[in-house]
Image (cartoon, helix red, strand yellow):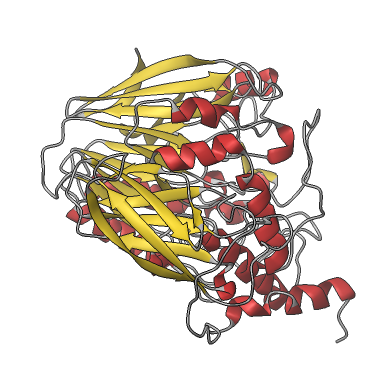
Amino acid sequence: MPVTRRQFLLRSAALAAFGKDAAIGPARAQRFADDPFKLGIASGYPHDSGVTLWTRLAPRPLAGGGMPAAAVEVQWEVAGDEAFRNIAAHGKAVATAQWAHSVHVDATGLQPGRPYWYRFRAGNATSPVGRTSTAPAAGAPAQRLRLAFASCQQYEQGYFTAYRHMAREDLDLVVHLGDYIYESSWGRNLVRAHGSDQPYTLTEYRTRHALYKTDEDLRTAHAAFPWIVTWDDHEVQNDYANDRSQDLDPADAFLLRRAAAYQAYYEHMPLPAWARPRGPDMRLHTTVAYGQLATFFVLDDRQYRSHQVCARPGRGGSTVVREELCPERGDAGLTMLGRAQEQWLTESFGRTRAAWNVIAQQTLMAQADRRPGPGGDYWTDGWDGYPRARERLLESVVGQRVRNPLVISGDVHMSAIADLKTDFDAPESPVVATEIAGPSITSQGPTVKRVEALLQENPHIKFANGTRRGYATLDITPTRCIARLRTVASVTEATSDIRTLTTYVVEDGRPGAHRA
């Protein structure tokens, strides 16, 4: 059958993402007339003897990067002091056009549980200095872990002021839970513009990522701490599920778009080499250990999930369904993570011996009934569209005797503190885990009226707020976890102040949070 021009573009424009590495030839030193480090530097995925370092050479970030086709040699250094008198590790990397002249260095040979400083050099240019840290030694009894987590940063809807405040916090780690970029323009009272239509091609996704990284506050937060990242839907397309787009594009065409989006994501994140994508496939789920104190289980609930059920005619994306009109929602075969990732997670739960176990994932896990009174209305793009999969995950937490399980969430543009149960419809069902959903960085949230109705109908949700933007912090010790929801006064003012909206505490051995 003939295809439309749009379908043809979708099929063809991302082919580079499927190719093998082009022959790069010898790397050369490059002289730059303009700063090639305009997109900043970053680190991520700390372990007890190393960390991943990232940069991308792009003297003209919004004009294709402004780099030659040739490979460029990049030198990197890690030091035990900010003045770089004590060099702990150093080496050379090769930045190629195939990967947008991005660099991912898995630096090793470092000491556990201490800060380091790092920088890059390319030709006559030197990057800013970044600060990172390694995790405590495996099995070490760490006494404290301080982290922030963030999500949902629609560039047009506000300034990334929250990141400026985050960079000033005393943190060991940042976790980003998705919607790092937005492919679409939407919302009210926009303060800046994407300047282009939705991305479909690799070049277009690269430009969108570069635009977001031109924000100084975002770059500052990246340079201040190591990050762990996962994606949600807007890194590719709103509400996509596996190989199905919300517009029901042909699967082969959509996978080409997904390949372009995944590659651009990798090129702009401090991801280890093992995460390098292969066409439309890219592994993100992993564990990150922080001594004996904490283990992070980083999940991917987009790439492998079942298609959403009970979709509206002509749409592949989500909707709100009445439970009695959508019995398919209860199908035990539906999965958010894919069966392989579910099995990996259960096995990982069985191996953890950490005092706190943090499940870092995209969207609200607590049941959120949207219908007042008897019966339920549920949003199918979140865990409410896959209730048996949620039940399996929480039953695995119980069955594997996971100690102090915490679920951190984003996506819904709403702060929330919730008790998690294997059966939300049974009041006597015990609390098995605690969920902390952080506010969005900028993305506009639900109305006060809608949030109040949600709280009335769902007593296991102890707190919710959709009007304030920001991030959440966790202060974890062997005896407790203190969760603070940190919000700015306004995202339309670049100099807005920040305050703590509310504070909740989870005690060791007692699932469920209480207000501090």
- Tell me where residue 346 appears, x and y as whole percent: 29, 57
Image coordinates of residue 126 in percent, x first then y, are 47, 52
Q: How many marks?
A: 0
- Quadrant (top left, top right, bottom left, bottom right) of the C terminus: top left
Left or right: 259 as drawn, with respect to 366: right
Residue at left 35%, top 45%? 394
Q: Position of residue 88 (x, y in %)?
A: 22, 53
Q: Nearer the viewer, residue 107 or 312?
A: 107
Q: Residue at x 54, y 57 (%)?
A: 268
The image quadrant of residue 483 is top left
60, 296: nearer the viewer = 60
In the depicted structure, whether residue 1 falls above or below residue 194: below
In the rendered image, the quadrant that contains the N terminus is: bottom right
What residue is drawn where x is 51% and y is 85%? 25
Confirm whether residue 423 shows in the render.
Answer: no
Instruction: Write down the quadrant of residue 142 in the picture.
Output: top left
Q: Relative to the observer, which residue lies in front, 134 or 157?
A: 134
Establish if 394 lies above or below 283: above
Residue 313 screen position, x and y as percent = 80, 58
- Considering every residue shown, the one lying at the far left of the view is 140
Q: Is residue 343 visible in the rendered structure shown here?
A: yes
Q: Is residue 211 above or below residue 430?
A: below
Q: Is residue 382 left or right of residue 338?
A: right
Q: Foreground residue, 181 or 360? A: 181
Residue 474 appears left or right of 494: left
489 vs 123, left or right, is right
Above or below, 54 against 273 in this view is: above
